[in-house]
Image (tube, rainbow, N blue to C red):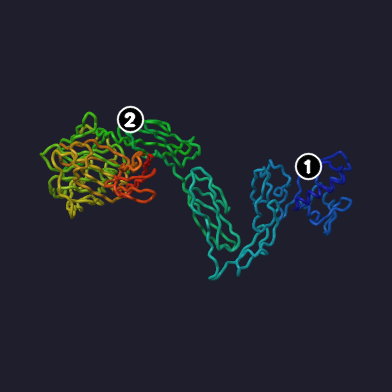
Amino acid sequence: MRLKVLGLLFALLACNTEEPGSPVDVGPSTDAQSADARQDAAPQDSGFQPDAEATLDAGFDLDAQPSDSGELVDAEPDSGPPPDAELDSGESVDSAEPTDADPGPDAAADASVDAGFACDSNPCFPGVSCEVLSSGAFDCGDCPIGYAGDGVTCSDFDACTLNPCLAGTTCTDRVAPDPGYSCSPCVGATCPILRALAGPDQETLAGRVVSLEGSASGNNGAITCSWSNDQDPSLLTTCSATVTVQAETSFELTVTDASGASASDELVVSIVPLVADAGRDQNKRLGDQVTLTASWSGASCSDGSCIECVWRNPDRSILATTCTTTTSPTFTTQYELTITDTLQGVVATDATTIFVTDAPANLCGWNVVVMTSVQYPTAPNPNYTCTPDGRARRQTVNGKPSLVVSDLEIENAKIVGYIGVETSSDDDLIGILWGMQNPAHTYLLSWKQISQDLGACGNALAGVAVKKIDGAAGAPTTISYNSAFGFNATDYVYTCADGWATDRLDESLLSPGSFFFVSPRDPGASAAGWRDFITYRFEIYHVADRSKVFIYEDDTRSGSTAVLTRELEIADSSYPRGQVAFFSNSQAQVDFGDFTFASLADFGARAGDDFAVDGGQTATLTGAAELAVPPYSCSWSESGLEFSGTCTTTTTPSVDTTYTLRVTDGFGRVAEDDVRVTVAP
């Protein structure tokens, strides 16, 4: 309003000297008459913009109205001197020094300021925020506490007239130089509790701007805010603020109300980590080409321009330096993806396994861990031979226990391996490990032919035992070529009961934290040992929270399920992902071979291909399952109504009909598939 009055004053005075429609010139002029008129109307300093308050001090009133002659007539004249008396020098006397209530011309800028200058000219009242609008103009925030106005000009007023304090407390108005108000403390049981509200915790990418919005409840009058953090000594003194966060930061908000009471609250801004995603595991057949595609989240760039990708083979050689590549593995292979955010210097890794379901693993590429017990440190070292194709490996020495460890980690997978003893001269331990983190943290299945008690190492009963080994942290994590063995190997000193005992009564001899899931000592357990010159097929179905083990006699390695020797289920989630290894202990001539793997993620029902029958002809529906955990069951339904609980059934459709096969496997997983039977007329 004051700026508008000032503009009206200039316009009316200019009308006495300028022709209608002419621009008003407030600068120097050679026309004496015009100059005299301008001297009465405005300061002669060409760069000076008087503020509205100064004009009012010169004797003008907000209620002034123009007379018929064009002069400004004060509706209620004040007692001050006429305007001309204060403008003889070209400047307003009152405007020379701003009062406490009036910030002066530097703060109250002319509203007609060029939008291109926007906030650079400090157009707002001191302490008032200035925002540049999309149009290029500026917008001032609220006046400080104790002031009222439009943000460009702010005047002191009695804030207590607004009743800002809590009922029962006293408001005291404060004047310049510390304008505002204060409230007396609230005393009594009915007084609200002051609480600072920093807002919920936030997540952001490194280097991004986040907004802090502080508030309070139970405050007595207005609040002031300050934000501190645990990364640097900076202090923000506004309730709303924006900050750039590079690392996880804890911000503490402190609010103080008009009675001087304070409260604090905290929020944590955490950094979204860079996450690499190598894609889901895939089942393929030998010769198939596979596409590896990297993805990621948490990058500091939105378009991927800051991301570098490297794919590596199991031997750490580089497969590709592009985010997408193709390959054709000849056996089950795990590829490691490394993602680098070049802007932040942050690295993330992930791996994907391509299961070549019809190609055995290269066992000769697997490393050996020789387990030297504290009790029997001088036993002979193992010796492993390989077949030329790498599909099989034989341990030939009656000596220290040893593990042959896979070059990949697997989860949610089916593991198949063949183990047999090709001699009749010994009766000790063979077995398999899975979920292996290292030799001290793994699931271990061991199988003894004939019972044998070794005292400090415990009793190895004939039959199958399964243990969770949770030993010391000193197990080897890296393995390299060892000339003493002639292959990649390392030595691990351990407690011999971990690799020998199968009797639950000897559980106290195991490493701390280790225990039996299954023991031949258990009621109803089988005490049958393995037999000489028989090849056994070990099938393990391993998911995050359980494992199921089947041991079949299968000399021909045909996948026969005719002779099931042992079936076990282990409910445990300690090792959901890990390596696989085969095992022997004090047993010579143990043959290991034809280890294959498959992802259980491809579990599915198979209802068969659509087919046609003649009218009145019987249709045979044959259901099957892929990668189902045994045993699995089937049911057939039509339009949601089940009519058969077997995998193979017959029906006689009179019209074209869709039948649904539902398969439930041994882990309770369910899959469905449809088949369409068309009836010929």
The location of residue 619, given as percent across then percent down, is 32, 42
Q: Residue furthest top?
A: 388
Residue 246, placed above or below residue 187: above
Mark yes or no: residue 230 visible: no
Identify the residue position indicated by label 2 in the image: 287
Distance from Cα at disc 2 to Cα at disc 1: 87 Å
Q: Is residue 339 above or below residue 39?
A: above
Label 2 element class: loop
On residue 214, the disc is none
Q: From the top left corner, tell me how far across and down residue 513 is, in percent.
A: 26, 52
Q: Quadrant of the C terminus?
A: top left
- The amino acid at mark 2 is Gly
Give me the residue at 31% from left, 38% from top. Answer: 408
Q: Residues within 10 Å of mark 1 (few under 14, many from 20)?
A: few
Indicate the amino acid at tag 1: Ser
> Which quadrant holds residue 538?
top left
First in sequence: mark 2 vs mark 1: 1
Q: How many marks?
A: 2
> Residue 190: x percent and y percent?
54, 70
Report the residue marked by disc 1. 46
Mark 1 element type = loop
Image quarter for residue 550? top left
Q: Residues within 10 Å of mark 2 (few under 14, many from 20)?
A: few
Residue 323: horizontal and vertical position, in percent?
43, 34
User: Which one is nearer the viewer's eye here, 153 or 46?
Assistant: 153
Q: Quadrant of residue 347?
A: top left
Picture residue at 84% right of the left edge, 48% below the top: 13
Q: Is residue 573 left or right of residue 150?
A: left
Nearest the viewer among 79 and 635 is 635
Quick check: can you spot residue 62?
yes
